[in-house]
Image (spheres, rainbow, N blue to C red):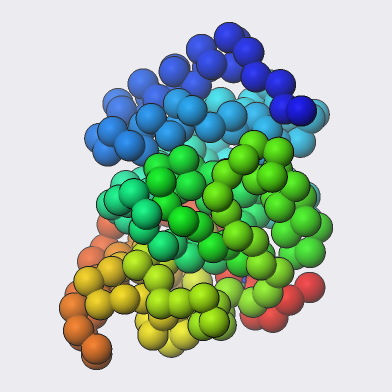
């Protein structure tokens, strides 16, 4: 069982207010942040920091993304109920849980076996609709595609071809692309079979997207 209480709920409300002040306006995103117990995705030792708007270490040298970053990427995806979404980089599972709470059908890939197993357990415990896969996100998930939307939560050197081909026309890919010092948050909207509109949405900092599984 995962424990939740009024203290955590109060902290989540504070977090929602601070995200609003930082420019997050999508009501569905804010509601999901209010609802999802971020502390359930934390190491017990760090649980007091679960509602601080910062990234924190999880297992395997990885991080749980900062709530602002999760909210920002979720907002760029413009999630509608029933959207089929592919996530690259399950990590703690928090981002996937937010998307599931917003009504998306989430498919999420992780290359670190321990993280894959742990997140799978948490989704089951909390009852979120997330299908998890152990594998290499550079390949996407062709057998389950195409996807309405794709989100990458690690810093990619470029937009992988497999992801380009697995997003539906009219759908989009939100991906932080490396520019040396940090990553630029990009949104690629698929306009037709071979046309994509590319947008820039500011600088962010992610752990790197790595080739192959571990
Ligand atoms: N969405 C996560 C963010 C975790 S950090 C969260 O909410 O906590 C990014 C994750 O991407 C790490 O767990 C890392 O192992 C994973 N990753 C890096 N390269 C990958 C790849 N090629 N395929 C799948 N996952 C990858």
Q: Quadrant of residue 187?
A: bottom left
Residue ranking furthest to the top:
6
The answer to whether residue 208 shows anywhere in this view is no
Give residue 49's position: percent from left, percent from top.
64, 26
Q: Quadrant of the C terminus?
A: bottom right
Q: Residue at x 66, y 67 (%)?
A: 133
Q: Which residue occupies the foreground of this view, 56 or 152?
A: 152
The answer to whether residue 84 shows anywhere in this view is yes
Q: Which residue occupies the foreground of this view, 82 or 70?
A: 82
Q: Residue at x 46, y 56 (%)?
A: 105
Q: Is residue 197 above or below residue 42?
A: below
Q: Residue at x 23, y 66 (%)?
A: 199
Q: Is residue 193 above or below residue 1?
A: below
Q: Which residue occupies the foreground of this view, 200 or 143?
A: 143
1 on left or right of 109: right
Give residue 76's position: percent from left, percent from top.
30, 53
């Amino acid at each position: 069982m995962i424990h939740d209480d009024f203290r955590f709920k109060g902290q989540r409300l504070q977090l929602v207010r601070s995200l609003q002040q930082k420019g997050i306006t999508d009501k569905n995103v804010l509601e999901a942040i209010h609802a999802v117990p971020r502390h359930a995705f934390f190491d017990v030792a760090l649980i007091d920091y679960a509602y601080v708007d910062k990234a924190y270490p999880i297992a395997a040298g990885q991080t749980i993304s900062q709530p602002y970053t999760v909210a920002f990427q979720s907002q760029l995806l413009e999630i509608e109920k029933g959207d089929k979404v592919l996530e690259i980089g399950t990590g703690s599972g928090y981002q996937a849980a937010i998307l599931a709470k917003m009504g998306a059908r989430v498919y999420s890939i992780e290359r670190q076996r321990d993280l894959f197993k742990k997140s799978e357990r948490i989704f089951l415990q909390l009852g979120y609709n997330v299908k998890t896969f152990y594998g290499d996100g550079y390949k996407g998930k062709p057998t389950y595609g195409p996807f309405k939307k794709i989100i990458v939560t690690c810093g990619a050197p470029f937009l992988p071809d497999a992801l380009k081909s697995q997003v539906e026309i009219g759908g989009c890919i939100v991906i932080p692309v490396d520019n040396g010092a940090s990553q630029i948050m990009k949104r690629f909207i698929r306009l037709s079979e071979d046309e994509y509109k590319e947008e820039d949405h500011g600088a962010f900092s992610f752990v790197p997207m790595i080739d192959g599984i571990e």
